[in-house]
Image (tube, rainbow, N blue to C red):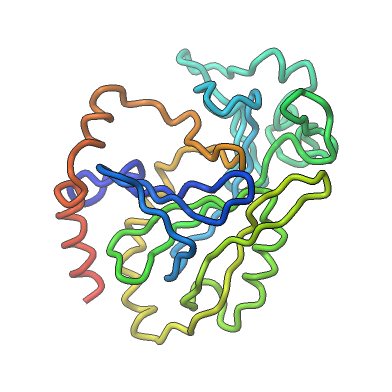
């Protein structure tokens, strides 16, 4: 925890649209979500992720079968007894992460290992790759969290590489464009556009966010990035206490953390 009990669960999540729609949905602690066409600000962290889900059902409530935060080592799901817990329908194909827990050589990281909603093989990878971004919008004190899905990684990567001063030293605009996959599916592609270069004073001021971001990364849990839903998946721990916490007004929950961050950035 950091400042007033702030955790990763308190950070507002950006939900990806479905069907090629071009509006981001930003969750709120209370009240209606915020809908925006673009987000302007600074990326505090861009993190690679690999995640293997047991099935295509976004609402199944399961935790990932295997996940990786470095694109090299896979961490297999464990049960309440601490032992590795892998569903039989996955074992019919192979062992996630291979026998040594590495992404390299894993059968689910091979092309044409993916399946569609009906369970038919497709050209993609069953283990999905994504990028998690903690993004500080202009005028905000706390960052939001967004996930770039696998379908957008190519375009997103090219956009980032085109920035004249790099992703962490630039003010950028993140927006969506409607495009069509080879299979004819309409999806919303992530784009990054350069707005301006951060001056040295701003770069120095942003260092005050480092402890917060490090803590958020440490406690982060996997999320679905399916364009069909984009809902949180497998983060349902906490029960009644977690729900009651969500109902506390945002200003009350974030007050102390905001004060700390303002003093660090001053």
The foreground one among 29 and 219 is 29
Q: Taking 18 as reference, is 213 above or below it?
A: below
Residue drawn at point x = 31 percent, y = 46 percent: 28
Residue drawn at point x = 55 percent, y = 64 percent: 175
Question: Picture coordinates of residue 19 (x, y %)?
Answer: 63, 45
Question: Picture coordinates of residue 8 (x, y %)?
Answer: 36, 45
Left/right placement of residue 229 relative to residue 186 reads left
Left/right placement of residue 184 relative to residue 131 reads right
Q: Which part of the image, by quadrant, shows the C terminus?
A: bottom left
Q: Taking 11 as reference, is 199 above or below it?
A: below
The foreground one among 207 and 14 is 14
Q: Taking 121 as reference, is 81 above or below it?
A: above
Question: Picture coordinates of residue 11 (x, y %)?
Answer: 34, 49
Q: Which part of the image, by quadrant, shows the N terminus?
A: top left
The foreground one among 240 and 185 is 185
Residue drawn at point x = 35 percent, y = 78 percent: 204
> What is the quadrant of residue 51 in the picture?
top right
Question: Picture coordinates of residue 10 (x, y %)?
Answer: 30, 45
Total marks shown come to: 0
Left/right placement of residue 159 relative to residue 104 reads left
Residue drawn at point x = 31 percent, y = 76 percent: 205
The foreground one among 85 and 42 is 42
């Amino acid at each position: 925890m950091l400042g007033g009990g702030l955790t990763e669960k308190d950070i507002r999540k950006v939900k990806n649209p479905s069907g090629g729609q071009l509006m981001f949905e930003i969750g709120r602690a209370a009240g209606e979500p915020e809908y925006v066409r673009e987000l302007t600000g600074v990326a505090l962290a861009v993190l690679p992720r690999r995640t293997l889900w047991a099935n295509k059902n976004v609402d199944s409530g399961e935790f990932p079968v295997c996940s990786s935060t470095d694109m090299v080592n896979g961490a297999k799901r464990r049960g309440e007894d601490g032992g590795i817990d892998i569903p039989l329908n996955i074992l019919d194909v192979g062992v996630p992460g291979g026998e040594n827990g590495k992404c390299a050589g894993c059968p689910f990281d091979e092309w044409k290992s993916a399946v569609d909603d009906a369970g038919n093989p497709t050209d993609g990878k069953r283990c999905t790759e994504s990028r998690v971004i903690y993004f500080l919008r202009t005028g905000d004190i706390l960052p939001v969290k967004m996930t770039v899905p696998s379908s957008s990684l190519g375009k997103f990567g090219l956009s980032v590489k085109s920035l004249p001063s790099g992703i962490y030293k630039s003010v950028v605009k993140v927006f969506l464009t409607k495009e069509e996959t080879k299979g004819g599916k309409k999806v919303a592609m992530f784009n990054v556009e350069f707005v301006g270069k951060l001056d040295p004073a701003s770069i120095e001021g942003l260092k005050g966010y480092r402890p917060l971001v490090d803590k958020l990364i440490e406690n982060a849990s996997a999320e679905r990035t399916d364009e069909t839903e984009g809902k949180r998946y497998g983060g349902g721990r906490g029960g009644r206490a977690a729900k009651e916490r969500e109902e506390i007004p945002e200003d009350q929950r974030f007050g102390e953390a905001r004060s700390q961050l303002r003093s660090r950035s001053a």
